[in-house]
Image (cartoon, helix red, strand yellow):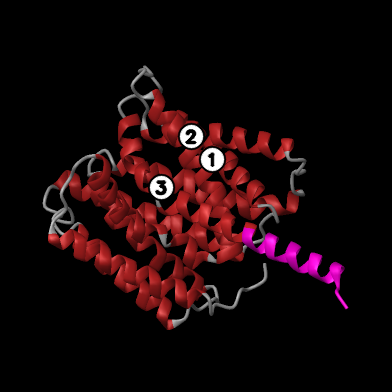
């Protein structure tokens, strides 16, 4: 006999699985591809905004958008106990991490910053290992391959000759550590069930912290030029609001290893964008480097399937 109820339940389950895969792929696209453009956008905005206040403004605008979206979708704010870890993650990644990155970008190139930031997934893995969540060996191997590929891609940019560039590079490396600590906290801490609220809380608290530090340090926004507004809106709505929401979704549903893989992929994506839209011609070394990065990500993603999640 036919079982229409069973067939309907099976079709519904398949539809939900497809929707979940689509959401994961969409989140990966935002984090892996669109975040590759953030370094150049930050440099465009630094002409009008001081570094720390830039992070504050873009984060607070993004937080307002996500809070409004959560209210429209009928998602109530999480209880107070679930704000602590998300708030601390926001302070680490935005108040400290993003501010250090903005300072570093004043003295180094966006390509160099992207290359140095590739250390972040390995830093996150080390912190998680110390916290008791040991990644599989293949994940370490994937991280090493990814870093090697990014180093090949920016072998000239990683020349630390100039003192000012050395200072900028040091600030970017410090930013990677605090961002990695935030990733580990999101992966291990007690976060809201909703990725929307996880992202909104991080942006709200992290942005508020950056605003306090920037104002206390004497930063002021003197003149916002029309040329800087598109970059500011792009950073606020796409990179911060959309990016943090996608990033939280990946950590919730795919794990920290998959979410942090963007640090390897962003640099070759930036090269690919230059090829497609700016007519740039990459060298043979750059093409080989992109192949190495893709291999590292493949190893990392395969290893991530075998990671046992630690309940928060």
Residue 201 in which image quadrant: top right
Label drawn at residue 35: 3
Label 2's element? helix
Q: Which residue is mark 2?
A: 236
**Outermost residue toward the front?**
1
Query: Magenta stretch containing residue 55, yes or no?
Result: no
Dot 2 or dot 1: first in sequence order is: 2
Image quadrant where one finds the N terminus: bottom right
Look at the image and give the residue range highlighted in magenta.
Answer: 1-18
Label 1's element? helix
Of residues 156 and 289, the one drawn nearer to the viewer in this rendering: 289
Label 3's element? helix
Where in the figure is residue 243, as x and y percent of width and height? 50, 46
Please say if 138 is above or below 49: below
Dot 1 or dot 3: first in sequence order is: 3
Label drawn at residue 241: 1
């Amino acid at each position: 006999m036919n079982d229409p109820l069973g067939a309907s339940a099976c079709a519904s389950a398949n539809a939900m699985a497809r929707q979940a895969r689509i959401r994961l792929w969409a989140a990966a696209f935002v984090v892996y591809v669109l975040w590759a453009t953030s370094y150049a956008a930050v440099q465009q905005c630094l002409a009008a905004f001081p570094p720390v206040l830039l992070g504050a403004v873009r984060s607070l605008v993004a937080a307002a958008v996500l809070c409004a979206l959560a209210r429209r979708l009928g998602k109530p704010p999480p209880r107070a106990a679930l704000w602590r870890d998300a708030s601390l993650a926001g302070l680490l990644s935005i108040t400290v991490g993003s501010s250090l990155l903005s300072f570093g970008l004043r003295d180094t190139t966006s390509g160099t910053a992207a290359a140095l930031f590739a250390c972040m997934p390995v830093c996150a893995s080390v912190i998680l290992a110390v916290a008791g969540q040991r990644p599989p060996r293949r994940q370490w191997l994937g991280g090493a391959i990814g870093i090697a590929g990014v180093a090949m891609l920016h072998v000239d940019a990683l020349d630390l000759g100039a003192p000012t560039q050395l200072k900028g590079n040091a600030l970017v490396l410090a930013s990677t550590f605090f961002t990695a600590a935030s990733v580990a906290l999101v992966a291990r801490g007690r976060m809201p069930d909703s990725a929307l609220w996880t992202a909104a809380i991080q942006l709200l608290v992290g942005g508020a912290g950056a605003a306090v530090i920037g104002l206390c340090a004497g930063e002021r926004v003197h003149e916002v030029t029309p040329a800087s507004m598109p970059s500011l809106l792009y950073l606020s709505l796409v990179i911060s609001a959309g990016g943090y929401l996608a990033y939280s979704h990946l950590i919730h549903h795919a794990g920290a290893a998959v979410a942090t893989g963007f640090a390897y992929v962003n640099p070759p994506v930036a090269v690919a964008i230059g090829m497609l839209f700016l007519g740039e011609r990459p060298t043979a070394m750059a093409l080989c480097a992109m192949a190495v990065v893709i291999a590292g990500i493949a190893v990392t993603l395969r290893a991530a399937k075998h990671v046992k999640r630690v309940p928060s």
